[in-house]
Each structure stands twice: as structure tokens, then as C-alpha cells.
């Protein structure tokens, strides 16, 4: 039977799946949570523009170092685009099928913080759900790092009519979705402060989130101490021989999370640590 972690230990290494409202920046939300929960630091898994709403995962304290493992995963959005001239739905669908599905080239918008060089991104779904005059409700599933506002602008240019995004909501960011039982808005988060039972229900232990994206490898208890100092993982540390299908994996000793490792083939060394959850001193 699992023993329940003390709430302070949970706050030290957890993730919140926040329903971001329209208005504040992603940094504002992250900072608000830091102050509300009295944490040392927080960070978000992928920026949403101020007007964009929806799924914004926020890492707490030591979980902030996991951002790189989650941020590149696929995202899903629903939104409304406005055409500058009315265009037949069939024509728009045809252009999307020909030029805006699969691998596409995209240059980040002028206001973005990243370098404005052309990059390749994959659009897995681009569906038009409903049309009301010049306004179209759409659904997009895409590779992380895709700019939806730019996607709509580029589509408008291709149509020859012009188009811009009116509203956008992120419904999924990797394993985090608006359908998750832990999905919570800022008002509900504030209500949970000081109520341990409510807070436990919305905190996602970071190691459980990692289980969703990486294979799990179990090691012997006698190996734990040296692994927590950042030493590489050897074959002899494993409880049983493992077949590694992925480049990265996570290591546990029973219920104790050790870290994230990258596969290596250097003699008897089978993994090098990318992140180790060292004990709090």
C-alpha cells in the first residue's frame, strides 16, 4: 500500500494543470501560483499568449527542472478564425489538405521571443467544425512549438482573402488535458489553499506525470545511495534485465523516484542521469 506523502513534500515536486484565463501572461499565472502557495519557484510548460485560454501546466519547486521533458509534446487547440472576405468552406478545406497538413514551414511571428528563422512543424489535424459567415470554428492538433496565430495568417494569405484569429483555447498540452480530473482554474486553486484535502486532489506528483511519457526501470535498493549522487546506471543496478526501446527512461526503487536517464552503450553503463531527485538536505 502506498504511503501518503506529506503535503510539503508533494509541493516540492508536483505539477498543476491550470485553466489559464484570458488577460494575464503565462508568467503572471506562474508567479501568482508561486505567491499563492508560498513556493520558491514555479515555471510553465509552454507559453500561451495573454488572450489565449486553456491548459497551462505549471511546475512547482524542483519539478521546474523537468520543463524540457514535457514542453515539446503535441498540443491541441480549438479557436475561431475570421476571414477578411467570405470564402467557400470547400475551398478552405482543399487548401488546408494541400498545404497545411503534415510537415509545414513556419516563421515565428514578429512579436515572438524566439529567433525569426523558418522552421518545420507538423500539423496532425486541422479541422473546420462550423462556419458562421466569415467566422470559422476550427480544431488543430500539432507539434509543440507551432504558432496557431501564424498558421491562420498563412492560411488567409494562401486563400488570397486574408484571415486572423479571433479566439483560441488550448485543450491539450502533451499528457495534460482540459478533461483531466486535476484541471483547475485560479479561483478553485485559491479555495484549496489551507485545505490539504482539496490541494492533494489537484496536485499531480511529478514522478507520476513522468510515468506517462517514459518507460520505468526498477533498481536494487542497495544502488539507490550512489545513484542519488548522480552516478551512471550499470546493468548490475537493475532488478531484472531490461530492453530499452526509448532513448530516455525513468528509474525507481519500489515507490521511490530516482531520476530521468538517457540510454548509453558504454560497456556496462546503460544510462546516464539527465535529472536526479536528490534528497532535501
Image (cartoon, grey):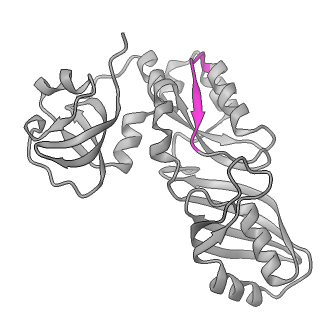
Residue under the image location 49 percent in, 23 percent down = 197
User: Is residue 187 shown left or right of residue 194?
Assistant: right
Residue under the image location 60 percent in, 24 percent down = 192
Residue under the image location 44 percent in, 27 percent down = 13
Q: Is residue 218 above or below residue 196?
A: below
Which quadrant is the C terminus positioned in?
top left
User: Is residue 231 shown left or right of residue 32?
Assistant: left
Q: Is residue 252 above or below residue 97?
A: above
Judged from this view, the residue extending furthest toward the right is 85
Q: Position of residue 233 (x, y in %)?
A: 19, 36
Q: Position of residue 7 (x, y in %)?
A: 44, 18
Of 49 and 33, nearer the camera is: 49
User: Is residue 143 shown left or right of residue 69?
Assistant: right
Q: Which quadrant of the structure image shows residue 100? A: bottom right
Judged from this view, the residue extending furthest toward the top is 281
Which quadrant is the N terminus positioned in?
top left
Q: Position of residue 72 (x, y in %)?
A: 51, 53
Q: Position of residue 171 (x, y in %)?
A: 62, 55
Q: Is residue 258 magenta?
A: no
Tally of marks: 0
Span shown in magenta = 37-45
Of 122 and 33, nearer the camera is: 122
Q: Is residue 157 above or below residue 11?
A: below
Q: Which quadrant of the structure image shows residue 243? A: bottom left
Residue under the image location 67 percent in, 67 percent down = 106
Amino acid at each position: 500500500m502506498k504511503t501518503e506523502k506529506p503535503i510539503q513534500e508533494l509541493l516540492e515536486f508536483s505539477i498543476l494543470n491550470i485553466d489559464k484565463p484570458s488577460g494575464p501572461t503565462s508568467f503572471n499565472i506562474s508567479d501568482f501560483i508561486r505567491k499563492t502557495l508560498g513556493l520558491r519557484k514555479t515555471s510553465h510548460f509552454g507559453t500561451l499568449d495573454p488572450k489565449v485560454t486553456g491548459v497551462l501546466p505549471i511546475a512547482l519547486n524542483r519539478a521546474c527542472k523537468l520543463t524540457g521533458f514535457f514542453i515539446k509534446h503535441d498540443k491541441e487547440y480549438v479557436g475561431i478564425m475570421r476571414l477578411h472576405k467570405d470564402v467557400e468552406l470547400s475551398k478552405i478545406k482543399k487548401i488546408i489538405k494541400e498545404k497545411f497538413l503534415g510537415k509545414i514551414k513556419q516563421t515565428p511571428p514578429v512579436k515572438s521571443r524566439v529567433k525569426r528563422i523558418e522552421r518545420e512543424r507538423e500539423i496532425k489535424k486541422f479541422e473546420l467544425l462550423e462556419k458562421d459567415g466569415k467566422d470559422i470554428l476550427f480544431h488543430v492538433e500539432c507539434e509543440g512549438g507551432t504558432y496557431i496565430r501564424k498558421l491562420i495568417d498563412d492560411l488567409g494569405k494562401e486563400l488570397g482573402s486574408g484571415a486572423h484569429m479571433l479566439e483560441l483555447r488550448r485543450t491539450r498540452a502533451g499528457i495534460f488535458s482540459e478533461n483531466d480530473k486535476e484541471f483547475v482554474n485560479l479561483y478553485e486553486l485559491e479555495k484549496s489553499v489551507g485545505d490539504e484535502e482539496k490541494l492533494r486532489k489537484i496536485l499531480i506528483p511529478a514522478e507520476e506525470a513522468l510515468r506517462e511519457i517514459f518507460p520505468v526501470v526498477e533498481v536494487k535498493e542497495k544502488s539507490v545511495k550512489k545513484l542519488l549522487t548522480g552516478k551512471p546506471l550499470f546493468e548490475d543496478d537493475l532488478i531484472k534485465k531490461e530492453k530499452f526501446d526509448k532513448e530516455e527512461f525513468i528509474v525507481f526503487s519500489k515507490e521511490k523516484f530516482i531520476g530521468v536517464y538517457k540510454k548509453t552503450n558504454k560497456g556496462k553503463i546503460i544510462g546516464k542521469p539527465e535529472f536526479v531527485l536528490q534528497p532535501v538536505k
